[in-house]
Amino acid sequence: MKKFDYEAVIGHELICAKLKQAVCRHQFVNAYLFSGAEGIGKKTVAYPFIAALLCHAPVDGKPCLHCPSCMLMTAGNHPDFITLQTPEDNKTFGVDVVREQLIQEAYVRPFSSERKVFLIEKGELLTTAAQNALLKVLEEPPEYVVFIILTTAQNLLLDTVLSRCLKLQFLPLNQALCHRYFEQLTTGDAPRRELAASFAQGNIGRGKQMLTDEEFYNLYENTVTNMQYLLNSLSAFADFNQFLTDNREKIENIIDFMLVFLRDALRLNLTGKAKLICTDQQAAVKAFSQKLAPGNLVRLMEAVIHYRERLQKNASFAGAGLELLTKMQEETHDQSNRNPI
Ligand SMILES: [Zn+2]
């Protein structure tokens, strides 16, 4: 069940205070943009704000959780709250969807609340045509309408759309708060919770995925294991290539795991005893940090970043993988590269 209470929010105090104040003072804008990484807490903050906007008797800017409007929110069928859900193929929102689900609805007065709220969960998926259509409503919105646009990539929204929104930037939480949050959970065992807290890097959703999503965790473990084999045998490069191909759909996660792992190895190499993100993979991190020089590790990270950029620019998957593996082989097996920088 969705939570409509600010109690469910970890951190982001300033943003919550601002939103509660807007409700207290009845000072709204017609469009809000919540931007920040996936899992950072945008939706967790949006829900109580939406419930408060629609609530018949908000308390200190928070939803009362008892009135008919709050009951409808809890039941998941509030007629004045419309979500533009992520398309199943996770591709784009075309102009037709926006016209039908948002624009036409925006001109129909609310049924049971003073306002009507529209939530767009992945603003970055709006096509340019869809954004231009949305802009027409944003330019002259009915006074009762509030749009809340969530996005992980503000740069993909048109300046004209951005200029109509009140922008709220969701930043990573501080590490101590993140650790406290995961420590008090009862899910998983203690080592897994420790890994989740460090892997979160200030993003509770990211940590939770490591804690509860077995497929995600297995992919992480397999990435590290495959990386470790690279140090020992040249045949491991073909296996690594196969691993990338087999998990093509999750390549972004694999790239992320590789970078986190290499960053750990570099830190350990430079400082002697770094606090690792891969808390459960100390032996593998140590092997990399002992066998390779800082220069090798930096160039490996650069190669992985370059690999990601090439894939983002739609390079051939096989070609980009081959380039990455060639570079990785040079850095891990070419003796001339082993000298410290
Ligand atoms: Zn209420």
Image (tube, rainbow, N blue to C red):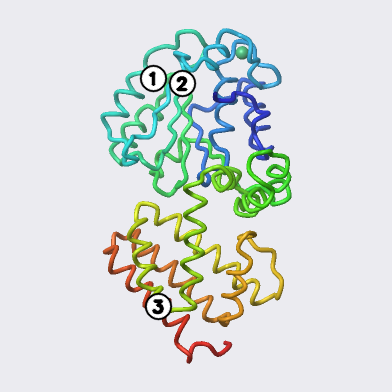
Q: CA distance from mark 2 to mark 3?
A: 53 Å
Q: Residue placed at 40% from the left, 68% from the top?
A: 306
Q: CA distance from mark 1 to mark 3?
A: 53 Å
Q: CA distance from mark 1 to mark 2?
A: 7 Å
Write down the residue under mark 3.
327
**Kind of residue indicated by mark 3:** Lys
Marks 1 & 2, CB-CB < 8 Å contact: yes
In this rendering, the count of numbered labels is 3
Q: Within 10 angstroms of label 3, few (less than 14), some, or many (20 or more) residues?
A: some
Q: Nearer the viewer, mark 2 or mark 3?
A: 3
Task: Name the residue type under label 1.
Answer: Ala
Choose the circle earlier in sequence order: 1 or 3: 1
Q: Quadrant of ligand 1?
A: top right
Counting residues from the N terminus, which is met first, the one under dot 2 or under dot 3? 2
297 relative to 308 in the view: left or right: right
- For numbered disc 2, what is the local secondary structure? strand
Q: Which mark is residue 145?
A: 2
Does 266 sit above or below residue 171? Answer: below
Identify the residue at horizontal 35%, vertical 72% (top origin). 238
* Residue type for callout 2: Val
Q: Which residue is mark 1?
A: 106
The secondary structure type at the circle numbered 3 is: helix
Q: Position of residue 236 (x, y in %)?
A: 41, 73
Height in image: 136 above or below 122? above
Q: Position of residue 206 (x, y in %)?
A: 55, 47
Q: Nearer the viewer, residue 164 or 191?
A: 191
- Where residue 111 appears, as percent x and y from the top left, is 45, 8
In percent of the image, x 42 and y 11: which residue is there?
109
Q: Position of residue 154 (x, y in %)?
A: 45, 46
Please rate how many residues cluster around mark 2, counting C-alpha atoms within 10 Å: few if below 14, some from 14 to 19, many from 20: many
